[in-house]
Image: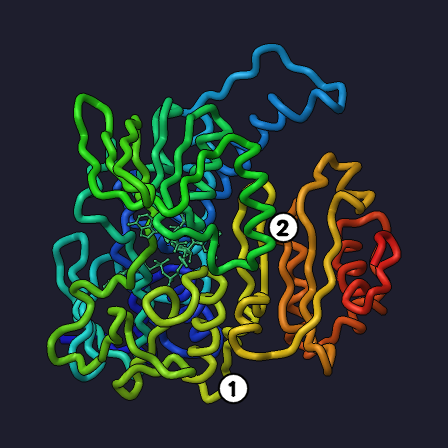
C-alpha cells in the first residue's frame, strides 16, 4: 500500500523545505523526506545549510572574529584584556546549539504546516513513486501527484586525499575540530577554503591554502579579488596560487602533501587537511533505473528554466540542478516550483542571485563582472568608491575595501555591483534591488542615503559612474 500526496519532496534542505512549506501554504497535502542525521545521531532537517554549511560556518566565523578583534583590534579603542583565550569546546558547543535550534525549527514549521516528515533515504521510481528506506528499518512507499527533487550536494573527494574524518576532512570535519590545529592545510581557495581557513587562522592556526588555478577567486570581479587577496595576505593566510597537489599521505598524526608550484615539486606538512575543491549533486541512489529522470553531463538533475525535469510532474531544485550552489537560490526555486504546481506564476532570476563570501573583509557581488562584459562585447562604464573615505567605516575601524558599480555605457542600466568590505553581505542587496527594478546608476545616485552609513559608499560609487562623486577626486 502506498501513501498518496499532492507533493512529495525529496530532501529537506533550503530548497526542499521551502518547496514543502510553500506547497502546504497553498493547500496541498505534502510529504518531505530527509535522510540526514545530526551530530546526536537523531534526524535533523534543514540540509547542508543548517547542519554543516551556512549557519554553523557563520557561527564559527563570528566566534573567531570576536576573538581576533579582542586580540588585535580592540587595543585602538582603548579596550584591553589580559591574555585572552579561546575555548574551542565552548565555541563548537555554541555552534551546535544554534544548529539544533534551527534544525528543530524546521521540524516545528513542518508540524505547523501539517507536512508529514519521513526520516530516511528516498529513491524515485516510475509513476512518481518514492520508496523510503526509513531509519527505523521500515520501508514506505509514497506516491505524489508531483515530486520535487531537492537532494542537494556532497563534497568532492580527491582520489589521493580521501576523507578520514580525522586528518583529512571536508567542511563537516573542519566545523568540528576539537582544538586549534597548529598547521592547517587547505586544498582549494574557494568559498569554503577561505571562510573555514579564516576561522582557524583567527584562532591561531598557521593556514596554508593551495589553489590549483593561477587566478584568485576567478568568478569574482578581478579588482575585488585583488583587494581581498591583499587583505587576506596581511592577515597571514598563506595562499599559494597555481599549486597542483598530487599527494597527501597521513603519517604519524601529520599529513604530508606534495604539490607542484609550476616550477618544481614542493612539500608541505600539516596537522589537518581541509579539502574544499567544490561540491557535486547528490544523486547517488536517488533515481531508480525506471525513473525516467535525466542527468546532465555534470551529473546534475537536468531541468529547464522552470525546474521541470524530463518527467512530467517531477521537478528539481537547489544544489542538485544547474546554477549557483547557494541556499538562497534554492529557497527561491523551492517557492517558485510550489507556486507553479499550484498554477501560479513562479520564476527565479538567476542573473540577480547575490554572492557573498563571509571573510574579513566580506566579498559580495551581483550581476556581471567587467571581464564577463568585455567577453560578451557589452559596452560599460564603472564607478568605484573606497570605504577608507566613508566616515562610518573609518569610525568602525573598518576602512578596507570598496564598492564598484558597473553600468551600461549607453543606457546607464546597472549590470553589476561588486563590494569588498565590512557588512557588504547586507549592502549588496541594494544592487540586487536596483537590478531587479532595471535601475540605472543615476537612479542610485539620486537616492538619498543616510549619513553616516556604509551604504554611502554605494551612493558615491553610483555618482562616480558619471564622474561626480563628492568625496573623492573623479
Ligand atoms: P542540501 O542543503 O544539501 O539539502 C539536501 C538534503 O537532502 C540533505 O539533508 C540530504 O540529506 C537530503 N537528501 C539527499 N538525497 C536524499 C534522498 N535520496 N533521500 C532523502 N534525503 C535526501 N550557501 C549560502 O547561500 N550561504 C552560505 O553562507 C553558505 N555557506 C556554506 C558553508 C559550507 C561549509 C557549505 C558546505 C555550504 C554552504 N552554502 C552556503 C551552500 C548551501 O549550504 C547549499 O547551497 C544549500 O544547502 C543547498 O540547499 P539544497 O536544499 O539544494 O541541498
Ligand atoms: P568552490 O568552487 O567555491 O572552490 C573550489 C576551489 O578549489 C576553486 O578555487 C578551484 O579552482 C579549487 N580546486 C579545484 N580542484 C582543485 C585541486 N585539485 N587542487 C587545488 N585546488 C582545486 O568550492 P567550495 O569552496 O568547495 O564550496 C562549494 C560550494 O559551496 C561553493 O561553490 C558555494 O556554492 C557553496 N558555498 C557558499 C558559501 C557562501 O555562499 N558564503 C560558503 C561556502 C560554500
Q: Give the residue drawn at x 56%, y 73%.
A: 374
**Would residue 103 be seen by someone viewing this image from the given angle?**
no
The total number of labels drawn is 2
Taking depth in this image into account, of 341 and 428 the one nearest to the observer is 428
Instruction: Assign a secondary structure to mark 1.
Output: loop
Marks 2 and 1, Cα distance to the nearest angstrom?
35 Å
Residue ranking furthest to the front = 263
Measured as percent of width and height from the top left, residue 152 is found at 33, 62
Taking depth in this image into account, of 114 and 429 the one nearest to the observer is 429
Q: Please tell me how crowded label 2 is: few (under 14), some (14-19), or many (20+) other residues with Cα within 10 Å.
A: many
The quarter holding residue 317 reads bottom left
Q: Which of marks 2 and 1 is in front?
A: 2
Taking depth in this image into account, of 277 and 257 the one nearest to the observer is 257
Q: Give the residue drawn at x 32%, y 56%.
A: 279
Instruction: Assign a secondary structure to mark 2.
Output: strand
The colour scheme applied to this rendered structure is: rainbow
Measured as percent of width and height from the top left, residue 432 is found at 63, 67
Q: Which of marks 2 and 1 is nearer the N terminus?
A: 1
The quarter holding residue 117 reads bottom left
Residue ranking furthest to the right = 470
Figure quadrant of the C terminus: bottom right
Q: Give the residue drawn at x 23%, y 65%.
A: 283
Q: Mark 2 — residue?
A: 420
Measured as percent of width and height from the top left, residue 389 is found at 80, 46
In the image: residue 385, left or right of residue 298: right
**Would residue 127 be seen by someone viewing this image from the given angle?**
yes
Q: Mark 1 — residue?
A: 345
Amino acid at each position: 500500500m502506498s501513501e498518496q500526496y499532492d507533493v512529495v519532496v525529496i530532501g529537506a534542505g533550503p530548497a526542499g523545505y521551502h518547496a514543502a512549506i510553500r506547497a502546504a501554504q497553498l493547500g496541498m497535502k505534502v510529504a518531505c523526506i530527509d535522510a540526514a542525521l545530526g551530530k546526536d545521531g537523531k534526524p535533523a532537517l534543514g540540509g547542508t545549510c543548517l547542519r554543516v554549511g551556512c549557519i554553523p560556518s557563520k557561527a564559527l566565523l563570528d566566534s573567531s572574529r570576536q576573538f581576533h578583534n579582542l586580540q588585535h583590534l580592540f587595543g585602538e579603542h582603548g579596550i584591553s584584556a589580559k591574555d585572552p583565550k579561546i575555548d574551542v569546546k565552548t565555541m563548537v558547543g555554541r555552534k551546535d546549539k544554534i544548529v539544533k535550534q534551527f534544525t528543530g525549527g524546521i521540524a516545528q514549521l513542518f508540524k505547523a504546516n501539517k507536512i508529514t516528515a519521513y526520516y530516511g533515504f528516498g529513491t524515485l521510481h516510475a509513476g512518481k513513486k518514492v520508496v523510503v528506506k526509513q531509519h527505523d528499518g521500515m520501508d514506505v512507499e509514497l506516491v505524489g501527484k508531483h515530486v520535487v527533487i531537492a537532494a542537494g550536494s556532497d563534497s568532492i573527494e580527491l582520489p589521493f586525499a580521501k576523507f578520514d574524518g580525522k586528518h583529512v576532512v571536508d567542511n563537516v570535519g573542519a566545523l568540528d575540530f576539537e582544538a586549534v590545529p597548529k598547521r592547517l592545510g587547505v586544498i582549494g581557495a574557494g568559498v569554503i577554503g577561505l571562510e573555514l581557513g579564516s576561522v582557524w587562522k583567527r584562532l591561531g592556526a598557521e593556514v596554508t591554502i593551495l589553489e590549483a588555478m593561477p587566478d584568485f577567486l576567478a568568478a569574482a570581479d578581478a579588482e575585488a579579488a585583488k583587494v581581498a587577496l591583499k587583505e587576506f595576505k596581511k592577515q597571514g593566510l598563506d595562499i599559494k596560487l597555481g599549486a597542483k597537489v598530487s599527494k597527501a599521505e597521513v603519517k604519524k598524526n601529520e599529513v604530508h602533501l606534495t604539490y607542484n608550484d609550476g616550477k618544481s615539486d614542493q612539500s608541505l606538512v600539516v596537522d589537518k587537511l581541509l579539502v574544499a575543491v567544490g561540491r557535486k549533486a547528490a544523486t547517488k541512489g536517488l533515481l531508480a533505473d525506471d525513473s525516467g529522470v535525466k542527468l546532465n553531463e555534470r551529473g546534475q538533475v537536468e531541468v529547464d528554466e522552470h525546474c521541470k525535469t524530463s518527467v512530467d510532474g517531477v521537478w528539481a531544485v537547489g544544489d542538485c540542478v544547474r546554477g549557483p550552489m547557494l541556499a538562497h537560490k534554492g529557497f527561491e526555486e523551492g517557492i517558485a516550483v510550489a507556486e507553479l504546481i499550484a498554477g501560479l506564476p513562479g520564476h527565479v532570476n538567476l542573473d540577480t542571485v547575490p554572492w557573498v563570501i563571509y571573510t574579513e573583509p566580506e566579498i559580495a557581488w551581483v550581476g556581471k563582472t567587467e571581464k564577463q562584459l568585455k567577453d560578451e562585447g557589452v559596452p560599460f562604464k564603472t564607478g568605484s568608491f573606497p570605504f577608507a573615505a566613508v566616515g562610518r567605516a573609518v569610525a568602525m575601524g573598518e576602512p578596507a575595501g570598496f564598492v564598484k558599480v558597473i553600468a551600461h555605457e549607453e543606457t546607464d542600466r546597472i549590470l553589476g555591483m561588486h563590494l569588498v568590505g565590512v557588512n557588504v553581505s547586507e549592502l549588496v542587496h541594494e544592487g540586487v534591488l536596483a537590478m531587479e527594478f532595471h535601475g540605472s546608476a543615476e537612479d542610485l545616485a539620486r537616492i538619498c542615503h543616510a549619513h553616516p552609513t556604509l551604504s554611502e559608499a554605494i551612493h558615491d560609487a553610483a555618482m562616480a559612474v558619471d564622474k561626480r562623486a563628492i568625496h573623492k577626486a573623479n
